[in-house]
Structure formats: C-alpha cells, structure tokens
Image: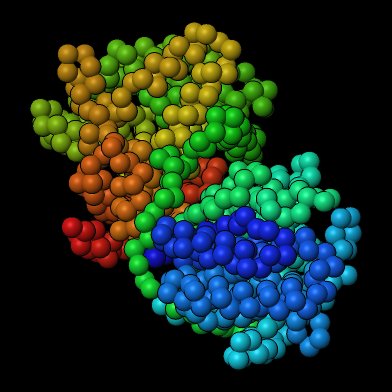
C-alpha cells in the first residue's frame, strides 16, 4: 500500500442456487485465494450467499436465516484476513426484506448497504421480493452487535486515510442518478458494485462503458463483481463479467462465461491528485457516516502495467487516429494564427531532423486548409559547423517533395564574424560556440519573415522544453510553436504516421530516413561525416524523460514513485542505476530551466500535458528542486 497503491479484487464464486452452506464455503475459499495475492479490497456479486436467481424462495424464512448464519460464518472464519470484504445477501429489517452488501473486516460486520433501485422491467422482478433501500442511517442488531444500515456509509481506512470506500448494487449504476455520484461527492474514491447482471447480445460492451465511464466522471476506482455460472439458467444466463476501472481506464476484466478472480492495483494517490487538480470536483461528507476499518500497511506487489510511452496509444488503430487528430489540431492552430494576421507566408527552419520535419508537415497541412499555395512556405536550411550531408540532403529533398520554397543560408561566415566580435576562440567548442549558431539561425529566420511578411513557425517540442534543451532566444523562440505540446516520443509516431499515409513513395522514404537519423542539434563538427553530437547521449533517452514528465505533471507522482514504476516498466532495458541517473538529471533540469518556459511563444495544446506559462504550468522560475532531488538521494 506504499505510495498509494492498493491491490483490489473482484471474484465470481461457483454457487449453487439456495445452498447457502456451499456458497459460503466457496466464498471463504476465494477469500483465502485472494489473500495469498495480497488483495486488500475483495468484492463478491450481489446476493452471492443465496444466489440471485432464488425467485420466490426469498420468501422462505429458512433461506433468509441461513444466509445470515453463513455471513456470520464467513466473517468468523476469515477474521484473520487483512482485507475489507463485500458480500451480498438478503437481509430482513423491520419486517421487510432488503438486498444488501455486507462490508466485513477482521471478524466484524462494519455495515449493511441496501440496494436503492430495484428493477421491475424485462426479466427483472425484484420488487416482488425486496424493498428499496434507504439513504438515512439506521442501526440494526446483527449477531448481537449494532450494525449501521443504509446507503450513506463511507468505509474509511484508519491507517490509509486516502482509502475511502462506498458501495452500490447492480441496477444502482444503471439509473440516471446512481448512488455512487453522492458517494463520490461525499468523499468516496473507491466504489464497489455487487452485481447480478444477466447476459444479452451487446450488453457486455455497454456494461464495460458504464463502469469505465462512471470511474471517469467520479474520478475514482470502480470494482464491479458480477454473478456467473452457477446461477439458474431457467430464463437467464449470467456471464461473470468482472471489471476494475480507474478514472476512465479499464485496469482488469474477466473472460466472459468463466467464473474468475481479477486483480488490479488502484492508485489512490493519483485519484486524489486528479481530484485536487479539478477545481470543479467538490466534496462534502454531508449526512454520510464514516465507518473506520483497519488494514496493515504492507508493500503492494505491483502487477499493474505502465506503458513505456504514456503519450502514445498502444493500439495501432487508436494510435493512427490519435496521430491524425494531433496533426489537425496543430494545423488548425497555425491556420487560425495565419488567418488572424491576414498572412499567407510562413518561414520554417528545416534541419533534416524530426522536429523541423514535423513543423514543415504541419505547416503544409495548414496551408492546404487555407487554400494557400505551398510554395508560400519558405523552408530555410542553414548549414554550419555540425551539418552533415545526410541531414542537409533530407532537408532539401523534403522541402521539394512537399512543394515548399527552399532557401539556403550558409551561416558559417556570419558566426565566424560574431566570434571575432565577441572574442570567442573557434576551437573552443563550449556553450557559446553552440548557442551562437542557434541564435544566428533564429535571427536569419526572423529577418526573412520580416522580408516576406510571414510568420516564423517554431519547431521545438515538449520534451525539449521540459528539459530546457533549447537555446534561450535561439531555437527556443518563434512566432508560433506548433510542436510546443508534442513530446519527442510522439513526434516520432506522427512523422511515421505521415510516412505511411502520404501516398508518396519518395516522400515516405525521406521521412523514414529522418526517423532513422539520431536526434542531434548538429552544433559540433561531424566525425568522419557522421553526426558527432547525439542528444540522448548528453541528456538521456527521451523515452525515459517523457515517462518521467508524464507521471510528474499528469499524475503528480513523487520522484520515488516515478523511479519505482520506471524500474518495473523498463526492466531489462535500463538498469536501476541508469534510470536513477537520468531521473535526477530530469528533476534538476526541469526546475533549473523553467525560465525558458516562462516566455514561450504561443502554440496549440494537443494533449493532457503541456508547459505553457499561460495555461498548464504556472511555475516560478526560481523554484527550488531540493525536495525532489533529496528524495532521490534517499534511494539505495
């Protein structure tokens, strides 16, 4: 449970209808099985002690009494299990029968939550046997103890205050205003649903959308345990579709028509971070009754998978759809800016690298949208000390294939004159040597834009901005930065997508060679004609930095937590020492380079992470990185 991770489980037992003793045996067996996997929250289906399909047998005193007796046995025989367990049963209160979820922990029944919405349509006829639950709190005597009874119960972990659990049952989720809405707005961040939802064609996808959608709207974890094989098939079939979701993401699901246990690691810290971030999400406990329970704070063995490239969809069709959408967002942003200034010219510095290639592709798309000839795009290549034939030729040929106008401005002489003016030794390849070239290129672009009445389109990407890997008032500056919120790992996929879909074989070949070229600013002389200055050798692998960036800004993770999940995600690719080295570098650079982000040019936001000082990241330039670095220094 360290760092906010809680292992949860949803289980479908093999029941026998109306055989409470058999069903209790099976529930106890599954509790023991889930205990071995470290599950701390365990959820069973609706009415699982009796079976959901008992029909008018629910009117039998013997069945009702047996269900209560077997709940007591389940609680007693699992009193040593360190988990909060939810099981379903029929329960009589004030002469009426209720469909309830019993919450149990360490040999104690903590509360009984009644089902609020009883369906009486289609195949369902629950009001024949049950009474709708109530919101107000009652106390009932169960096994000689006073037990809270009502829907407004919040089960709160004393040793982990961020863990607040509430329950609803099956149909409660399907109504227009589910109880889980009130639960979440009163502080619950983990909702459990004990369900017996029968199968019909297409119902599984609708059920999945309900669960994931509710977890997104309520910014919570959602555990859905469904009845399965063993229920009566007189008129219905139950498929045992168990689901676990977190804030719109499906973490685990069972196979249809197989009674299974599914597990997932719910990230409570991320849920709490998201709720803090969303100022429209408000909580007020109101009339809800907090019910404390205790769990041991143990290490959660993580089985959850974290994508290596969190900015990039893993599914190919989703990825292609996302790439096309992002290219359109970028192009639409530039289109609006050009239309606003009544401009029909653009200037792009083209180097033969990934970022400038993407900027030129986006500019071409924007010009097509505006029905402006692509020849009005001035693509400028500015060779200097580090330019290689490979990147130079790719820059030139790419420009020609796209129909833009190519302009070459060799800046070597201008930089040499500048070195003489400031007394810089040309043989000293220091930061002045490198940045002078970057600033000269920016000056050329700005002046050419003034000449033709155009806009300088920026090429720098989100990853470079996060690391500050840009020359201040050099490539850091433009009149509109189309790549400003596109991370490097996504830039690669955008160019690759364009190469696969452009229907121009030669253009595709050029783009593929750009993709195969090492990332470099090309500010140092080449060695034997090849690039000598490789960015990832200097600042670290971009796939690591994009991973760090996503989980720091989007998820609010601490450095130790980022390190933990990075070690799991990149196991076998990078050693722990390498990950720690670059994470320290990332934290240091992220804080120290904020001054560059404080004066960024305009540019469109395309995803959930951006560093614009006018929007997503309002961070002081002199903030101290001490806490972040210090936490990493504590790692052994």
Q: Position of residue 505 (x, y in %)?
A: 52, 8
Q: Position of residue 159 (x, y in %)?
A: 41, 77
Residue in front for this viewpoint, 259 or 169: 259
Task: Decide if residue 552 is in sight here.
Answer: no
Rendering quarter of residue 433: top left
Q: Is residue 577 above or below residue 531?
A: below
Q: Is residue 622 above or below residue 458?
A: below
Looking at the image, which residue is at 32% across and 28% down? 519
From the viewer's perspective, tell me whether residue 278 is left or right of residue 198.
left
Quadrant in which the C terminus appears: bottom left
From the viewer's perspective, tell me whether residue 600 is left or right of residue 560.
right
Q: Position of residue 104 (x, y in %)?
A: 55, 76
Looking at the image, which residue is at 44% across and 71% down? 81
Looking at the image, which residue is at 68% across and 89% down? 140
Residue in front for this viewpoint, 193 or 501: 193
From the viewer's perspective, tell me whether residue 45 is left or right of residue 380.
right
Number of numbered labels in the structure image: 0
Task: Decide if residue 530 is in sight here.
Answer: yes
Q: Is residue 238 above or below residue 267?
A: above
Quadrant in which the N terminus appears: bottom left
Residue in front for this viewpoint, 308 or 500: 308
Looking at the image, which residue is at 13% across and 28% down? 426
């Amino acid at each position: 449970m360290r760092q906010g991770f809680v292992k949860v489980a949803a289980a479908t037992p093999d029941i026998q209808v109306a055989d409470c003793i058999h069903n209790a045996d099976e529930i106890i067996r599954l509790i023991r099985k889930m205990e071995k996997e470290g599950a701390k929250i365990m959820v069973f289906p609706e009415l699982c002690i009796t079976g959901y399909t008992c029909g008018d047998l629910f009117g039998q005193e013997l069945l009702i009494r047996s269900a209560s007796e077997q709940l007591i046995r389940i609680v007693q025989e699992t009193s040593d299990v360190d988990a909060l367990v939810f099981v379903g049963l029929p329960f009589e209160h004030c002469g009426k029968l209720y469909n309830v979820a019993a919450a149990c922990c360490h040999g104690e029944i903590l509360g009984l939550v009644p089902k609020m919405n009883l369906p009486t349509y289609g195949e369902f006829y629950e009001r024949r046997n049950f009474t709708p639950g109530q919101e107000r709190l009652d106390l009932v005597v169960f096994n000689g103890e006073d037990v809270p009874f009502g829907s407004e119960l919040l089960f709160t972990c004393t040793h982990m205050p961020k863990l607040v659990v509430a329950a609803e049952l099956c149909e409660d989720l399907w109504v227009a205003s589910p109880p889980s809405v009130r639960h979440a707005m009163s502080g619950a961040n983990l909702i459990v649903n004990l369900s017996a939802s029968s199968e019909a064609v297409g119902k599984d996808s609708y059920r999945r959308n309900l669960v994931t959608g509710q977890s997104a709207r309520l910014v919570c974890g959602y555990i859905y345990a469904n009845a399965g094989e063993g229920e009566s098939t007189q008129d219905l079939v139950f498929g045992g579709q168990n689901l676990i979701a977190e804030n719109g993401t499906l973490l685990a699901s069972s196979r249809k028509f197989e009674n299974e246990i599914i597990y997932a690691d719910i990230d409570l810290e991320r849920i709490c971070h998201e709720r803090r971030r969303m100022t429209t999400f408000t909580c007020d406990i109101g009339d809800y009754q907090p019910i404390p329970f205790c769990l041991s704070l143990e290490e959660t063995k993580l089985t959850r998978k974290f994508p290596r490239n969190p900015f990039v969809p893993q599914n190919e069709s989703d990825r292609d759809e996302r790439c096309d959408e992002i290219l359109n967002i970028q192009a639409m942003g530039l289109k609006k800016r050009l239309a606003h200034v009544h401009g029909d010219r653009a200037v792009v510095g083209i180097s033969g690298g990934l970022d400038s290639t993407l900027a030129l592709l986006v500019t071409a798309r924007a010009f097509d949208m505006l029905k402006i000839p692509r020849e009005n795009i001035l693509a400028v290549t500015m060779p200097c000390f580090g330019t290689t034939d490979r990147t130079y030729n790719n820059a030139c040929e790419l420009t020609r294939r796209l129909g833009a106008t190519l302009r070459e401005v060799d800046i070597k002489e201008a930089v040499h004159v500048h070195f003489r003016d400031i007394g810089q030794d040309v043989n000293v390849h220091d930061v002045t040597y490198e940045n002078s070239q970057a600033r000269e290129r920016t000056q050329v672009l700005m002046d050419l834009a003034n000449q033709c009445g155009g806009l300088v389109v920026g090429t720098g990407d989100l990853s470079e901005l996060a690391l500050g890997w840009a020359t201040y008032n050099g490539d850091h500056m433009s009149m509109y930065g189309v790549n400003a919120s596109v991370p490097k790992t996504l830039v690669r996929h955008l160019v690759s997508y364009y190469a696969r879909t452009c229907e121009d074989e030669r253009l595709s070949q050029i783009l593929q060679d750009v993709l195969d070229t090492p990332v470099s600013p090309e500010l140092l002389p080449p060695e034997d004609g090849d690039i000598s200055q490789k960015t990832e050798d200097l600042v670290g692998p971009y796939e690591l930095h994009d991973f760090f960036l996503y989980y720091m800004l989007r998820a609010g993770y601490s450095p130790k937590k980022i390190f933990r999940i990075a070690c799991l995600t990149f196991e076998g690719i990078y050693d722990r020492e390498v990950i720690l080295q670059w994470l320290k570098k990332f934290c240091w650079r992220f804080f120290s380079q904020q001054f560059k982000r404080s004066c960024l040019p305009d540019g469109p936001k395309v995803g959930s992470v951006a560093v614009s000082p006018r929007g997503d990241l309002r961070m002081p330039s002199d903030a101290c990185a001490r806490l972040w670095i210090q936490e990493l220094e504590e790692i052994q």
